[in-house]
Structures are given as structure tokens and as C-alpha cells.
Amino acid sequence: MKIKLLLCSIILFSVITVSPAQQQWPESLILTPEKTDFIKTSTYAEVMQFISAITPMAPNAHVISMGKSPEGKDIPLVVLASSKISTPSEAAASGRPVIYIQGNIHAGEVEGKEAVMMLMRDILLGNKKRLLENQIILFAPIYNTDSNDKMEQGRRPSQEDSPLEIGIRENSQGLDLNRDGVKMETPETQGLITNIITKWDPQMFVDLHTTNGTWHAYSLTWAPSYHYAGEAGPYEFVNNKMLKDITKTAGQKYGLFFGPYGDYDLREGWPLKNFYTYNHHPRYLVNQFGLRNRMAILSEAFSHERFYQRIYSTYAFVTEILEYTNSHAREIVAINRKAEEDAINNVKQNSGKVKKGVRFKMVSNEILNDFRTYDYVATKKADGKTEFKRSGNVVTFDSVKYYGTFQAEVESTLPRGYIIPAEFAFVAEHLRKHGVKVDQLTKATSYKGDVFEIAELKKSQRKFEGHFMATLSGEFRSQSRKFKKGDYVVDLAQPLANFIFYLLEPQSDDGLVNWNFFDSYIEKQKADNKTVVYPVFKYY
Ligand SMILES: [Zn+2]
């Protein structure tokens, strides 16, 4: 009896010690949701406490600040590598690609923050150390620091108060950090672009969100970088290979359903026919990455699931992204490098000859089968109109048209470069912050190229992110023009060629014109009754 009991306890003990569920963490590494049965999400102070607790235990972790939030909080970033890396030059010298992953850009979408900390724990101290074999990981768990702590119940009804209280979507200036990628009006974006992106040069950017849209029945949906004015290589790898493979793995390994991001419109009726993605604009950080010849992934957990489930699906997705980048590290670097070379060569060989898109529309060129969604039943309202009510049943549909690509509506000729008059120093400075190489003329020089004659400057009626968005219509006219010493020259044969083109083209749908960089100049010229010419000159 005693021997049996001893044997039993030995067997039991050995089962316990090998089980991954028995990983022992010190109290300081237990996350707020874990401590509270997933009723609460971590505050900024709790995230900082976690980072202060874990980094002394892991000699291969290094903490830096991306910059300060408007309220003066440091935005923390943890560098994880097989041996400690503390500077971008050490990262570059290691020959390993940098993978950047951030949570909490919208501070009501908090699961990325928790999943990133969970994964940090497993990679540094647990059973996922192998994820540092071939890569360097930058984890930014709490990008929107300020608004995380302005917690209140009922902010996102779709989440049914799970967790009970969450923060605000916008930053403390009231600006959406995921619409700020072009204009860079927040300290958060400026810190991210100037201190991290342009210095550490991540090959992959991952942005963790939670969608409160359509009741599709996926635990997580994803999107690549919709970069359509950029090179195709990085997009094709992420969209056609990596995300499809990870989606398969999610089912096999985790029993989770993942799929492409989007919404459907019940006004189109039921059964489901069309599913639409969001947008291609580089104001969204993920989309900007494609124009930077790098890869990026948007991750959207499903807000209608409980908090613990959303953390799990985000955790599984980020884990599988890192598995994939770890085992395809060289391929990813090679694809991105080729995209960069192609962008530069295109300018050198084809400027003045080829056109590239500057305004785009969403189109469908993919059919989704086995598309999962909650079902809807039709009822007649008192006024005779049909109303669709969601049922608790999950169904699948075939032949759903997926609007997940973009087609150019307006194109413009690719120049060799742009000249920006000296009085627009703020434009040159803005481009430099984005990582663009901008030179100045050392003597008066003549250039042959195009000016854009403005027919109309149209402003939106409604304010968006503090702006009445502007669009220009007009026509290009070829011209030779003499520029003076001190004017700015942007040679487009540089790595950010595609991004610069999108920012500076006058008819672009998400460039500097749209964000009002030139309004006061144009409006003043109009008042003087001159033919108004867009001040940035294209040369060939
Ligand atoms: Zn979001």
C-alpha cells in the first residue's frame, strides 16, 4: 500500500515536472489578468513593474525608451536577442533581422499588451528560447501609454466588459495613433519612426489590435501591408505564403480559426456575398511598411470573444509569426533587400517613362470558400422592411467575394527626384524625420521636369484627426526651371523611393497635400489671383 502510494506520487510528481503547465513564475511575473481571473488588464505601472522584474532575470534582455508620451511617460521597448543587444549597430552587426511587435496602439484593445508580456516571459525564461536563434525581437507592449490608464467600464460594448474596464482608443492628445503615420503629429509616432524604425530597421512590423466589427466567426483576422505603390515582393511573401501557412498551423496546433481581415455589410442582404478589407493608406503603420520595402502584419483579435480567449489567439498568432520569421529569417531579409534594390533601380532606369498609382480603389480578385460567420435570420419589421437578426449558429459560405486588393485610379509619372523650395524647410524636415535623404543645392541649378498646375484645392467638410483633408486637381505641364542655392533636392534613387513618391505626389490620396502641408501657400497664392502651381517640382 505504502509502496504503491510512493510509486503513485513519483509518477504524479514526474508528470507534474514535465508538464509545461507547471512552469513556475515568481509572483512578480504573474500578469494582472492572470491574478484577477481576467477581470482586469494591466496598468502602465504594472507593465513597467513586469519589465523591471523580468529584465534582471534575463541577461539577454535590454530595455529602451522609444520616447515620451504627451503626458511624459516613457514608452518602453524590450530588445530580446540570444545575447544582449543594446544598440541598432550591434543588431546590424549580428546579421540577424529585427522583428518589431507592438501592442495597445488603441488602448481599448488590450490583448496584444498581455500577449506580448506572456511571450516575453516564455522566450526569456520559459520554453520558447529557440525563437531567438535567428532573429532579434523588439517588443513594445504598451505603445499608447497614456490612454491605457484612463480605464472605464462599458467603453467597447462588443467586449461585454471583459475585461471590466479598458482605456481610450486615441492617445492623450485625442489623436488616433494608427492614422498618424504620414503626418507624425504625436510624440508616439515621432518616437517610433525616428528612434526605432529608421534606426533599428525592422524587417517585419506587427501591430496588434482587436476588431469590434462584423460577427465573422474567426478568433483572429489578419492583413498584410496594402502598399500598392510599392514593390510586390514583401507583400506577396506575407500575404500568399506566410499568413496562409500560419492560418493552417493555427487550426492544427491551437484549434483556432484565423482568416483575412474585413467586414461585411448586412444592407447587402443575406446569405453573405461580399467581404471587404479596410484601406491602403500609409497613415496606417502597417501599410506604410510596404512602401518602406519591409513586411508588416495587422492582427485583429475578435472582440466578441472573452478576454482570455482574445489573449490566447493573439498569443498563438504572435508565436507563430515569430516561429515563421525565425525559420525564414534569411529569406525575409533577401526579399526585402531585393525590393529596396528594385525600387532604386526602377528610378534609375525608368524615371520619366513609367507611371505608378497615387490614388486607389478597393477591388475583389479573390474568392473565399468555407468562410465562417455567425448566421443571420430575416425578420419583418412593423414598417415592412426586412431586418437581419444574428443567430447563435455558426455557418460557412462558399464563393464569398473578398475585396482585399487595390487598383490604381490615378497614376503619375515616376520622376528622378523632387525639388522643394527653401521656404518649405518644414517639408524637408518632415521627410528627414521619416528617414528620407534630403540635400540642398550648393549653387543655382536649372532642372527640366514637370510642374503641377492646380485647378482646385478641395477641403473635406468634416474634420478628421484635427484636419480638413485636402485634395488637389489639376494638370502636369513640362517646364525648365532654375532653382536657387539652398533649395532642397530629393534624389528618388534611395531606399524610400516609393514612400517619398506617395508623400510628395500632388494627387496622392494620403500624401503631404492631404494633410494640409501646402494649404496656406496655395490659399495665399489664390488670394493673389495667380496661376497656382504646386510648389514641389518633379525633375527627370
Ligand atoms: Zn485597433
Image (spheres, rainbow, N blue to C red):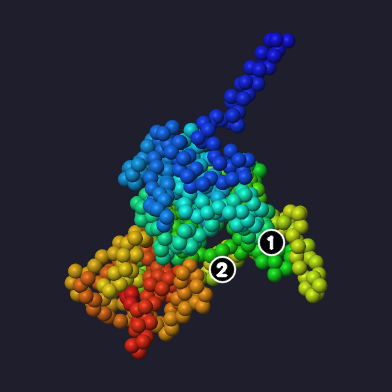
Whether pointer 2 and pointer 1 mark residues with C-beta atoms closer than 8 Å, the reply is no
Residue at left 40%, top 68%? 503
| Left or right: 252 in relation to 202 | right
Residue, far bottom: 529
| Left or right: 217 in relation to 174 | right
Quadrant of the image containing the C terminus: bottom left
- Residue 340: % across, % down: 38, 57
Residue at left 26%, top 65%? 439
Q: Is mark 1 within 8 Å of ligand 1?
A: no
Helix, strand or loop status at disc 2: strand
- Give the answer, above or below, for where 430 lies relative to 128: below
- Give the answer, above or below, for where 190 lies relative to 538: above
- Give the answer, above or below, for where 254 lies relative to 271: above
How busy is the neighbourhood of tag 1: few (under 14 within 10 Å), some, or many (20 plus)?
A: some
- Is residue 224 something one can see in this rendering? no
Q: What's under tag 1, amino acid-wise?
A: Ser
Residue under circle 1? Answer: 399
Residue, far left: 443
Marked residue nearer the N-terminal end (2 or 1): 2
Helix, strand or loop status at disc 1: loop
- Residue 293: % across, % down: 42, 57
Quadrant of the image containing the N terminus: top right
Residue under circle 2? Answer: 362
- Residue 283: % across, % down: 46, 64
How busy is the neighbourhood of tag 2: few (under 14 within 10 Å), some, or many (20 plus)?
A: some
